[in-house]
Amino acid sequence: MQIHLCRPDITESEIQAACEVLRSPDLSLGPKVAEFELAFAKYIGRRRAVTVNSGTSALFLCLSALGIGPGDEVITTPFTFISSATSIMMTGAKPVFVDIDPVSLNLEPANIEPAITAKTKAILAVEVFGNPGGIDKVCRIAAKHDLSLIEDGCEALGSALGGKKVGTFGTVSVFGFYPNKQITTGEGGMILTDDDSLADICVSLRNQGRGENGGWLAHERLGYNFRLSDINCAIGIVQLSRIDEIKAKRREVAGWYRQMLAGDERLVVPVEPPNCELSWFVFVVRLADGFSPERRKEILDQMARRNIQVSNYFPPVHLQPFIAEQFGHEYGDFPVTERVSERTIALPFYNNLPKDHVGIVCKALKEVLG
């Protein structure tokens, strides 16, 4: 038996919705795109939503719409999935990393202001593993320095801080719909903003630079084919309608893990932060400080040999070879990120993971910890 790291939760409703589009003539640029956008904007509480083909594309288009390019700097985290940094690089701008808070694993707000220079144009803040902790402080820093805030909520759909939903903090905010996310469209992403001008630019950029009133072969700017099809959007509409159910399922699975791993001093087990509604994206434990990176690798290998998929979320972005070479980073630049990254273990986590499988994972983990 293989226990998988992640699995989507697709019901007959999503399948039927996709089939209905396939039976129609509107496979792309049809009514399901606008329907998904309107439903998503309403759920988050923003004026505009723009579908795209991935969270990475969404980040890139947000940065592009804000006019960020060569010579500019964008402050971001080194503890994230790599697209948070590479989307900045795709514009020609420079990602400026600052170290993270050891509890929330998000940007440490106290580290941001010392990194601001005359070249800084924006902050790209990631709500890592669904945790929005500190995003309110980052928002205030951005406003104080007249910087745009790109809120990367790709892992945090449904989370809230102080009653304010993730997706409402940024100048622009971004979500992703890869199959391991809270909701999926297979592949896909969404841009949220209250700024009509920014939304209109993103709509144009995702559609080959076409204008709102121009013809199919009239292009107002350099654009891209980052559209999301009506098939994907139909799936997304159903998934979004199930968001409360999905969050509840994931909370239950997280609760089983927390119960079964409670009190084990060899592990740091994630908890829900104060004043926060956490929409669980993954369940990532950390080894205690006495464990070496080599020992972590042995643990990952031993779990895999037991047919339990686990992973090392996340390796430090600044130490990815091509980024380290381009920007001159080396080990020791961001010690909190490095210390955390060397000890994380992502355990199997998805909506319909059975409780007995959680028990198998926990029992195996305790055994291989020694």
Image (cartoon, rainbow, N blue to C red):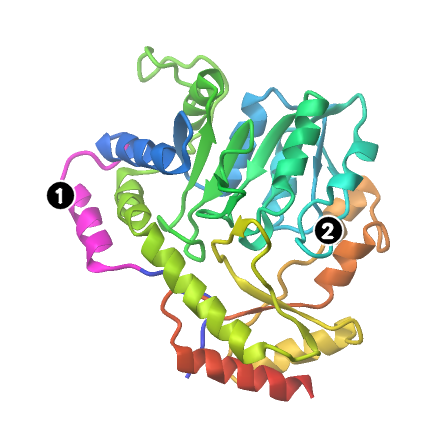
Q: Residue at x 82, y 47 (%)?
A: 329
Residue 200 visible (yes or no): yes
Question: Element under label 1?
Answer: loop
* Placement of the N terminus among the 4 image quadrants: bottom left
| Total residue callouts | 2
Q: Quadrant of residue 29?
A: top left
Q: Position of residue 135 (x, y in %)?
A: 62, 40
Q: Quadrant of residue 115?
A: top right
Query: For this view, does 71 lie left or right of residue 28?
Result: right
Q: Which residue is mark 2?
A: 101
Question: Element under label 2?
Answer: loop
Q: Above or below — where is 223 with respect to 303?
A: above
Q: Residue at x 58, y 81 (%)?
A: 303
Q: Is residue 76 magenta?
A: no
Nearer to us in this view, 337 or 222: 337
Query: For this view, does 10 lie left or right of residue 219?
Result: left
The crowding category of the residue bearing disc 1, from other C-alpha atoms within 10 Å (few below 14, some 14 to 19, many at least 20), is few
Q: Is residue 25 magenta?
A: yes
Q: Which residue is mark 1?
A: 23
Residue numbers of the magenta segment: 10-28
Q: Amino acid at mark 1?
A: Arg
Q: Position of residue 343 (x, y in %)?
A: 71, 68
